[in-house]
Image (cartoon, grey):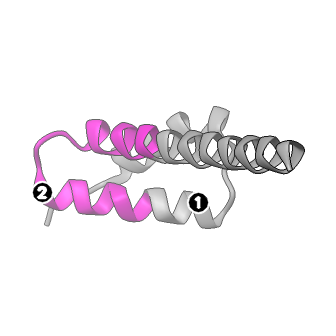
Amino acid sequence: MDYFIVFITTAAGLYFHGWLYLRIKRWMDRDLALSLAGSDPDKRTYMLERLGEARKAKIKRRYLQPWLENAALAYRAD
């Protein structure tokens, strides 16, 4: 019974740490996109859409910042 409790506790802890790691990674990516957008609400929406596009295209994290910077430069306010 003791081994079962240790196993369940360890599994839950590992799951939680994995979940937390992914959440923090997503928050950092979102913060990067919003920081490149500045205070313009339309550009913020645009950059969040580009972030979603980058996630669908499975852009690696080391290439994400230059990719988002290029997207920010390509933005045109109408």
**Badge 2 element:** helix
Is 71 drawn above or below residue 56 in the view shown?
Answer: above
Give percent across and percent down for residue 77: 16, 59
Q: Residue at x 57, y 41 (%)?
A: 64
Q: Residue at x 11, y 43 (%)?
A: 39
Magenta stretch contains residue 29: yes
Looking at numbered disc 1 in the image, what kind of residue is underneath it?
Arg
- Residue 4 left/right relative to 19: right
Q: How far apart, in angstroms, are the residues tagged by discs 2 and 1?
A: 21 Å
Q: In this rendered view, identify the residue nearer to me: 27 or 45.
A: 27
- Residue 37 left/right relative to 67: left
- Residue 70 left/right relative to 6: left
- Residue 34 left/right relative to 28: left
Q: In this rendered view, identify the residue nearer to me: 51 or 15.
A: 15
Labelled disc at residue 74: none
The quarter in which the C terminus is drawn is bottom left
Give percent across and percent down for residue 26: 49, 47
Labelled disc at residue 55: 1
Question: Where does label 2 land, which residue?
Answer: 41
Q: Residue at x 35, y 58 (%)?
A: 48
Looking at numbered disc 2 in the image, what kind of residue is underneath it?
Pro
Residue stretch rendered in magenta on the structure? 27-50
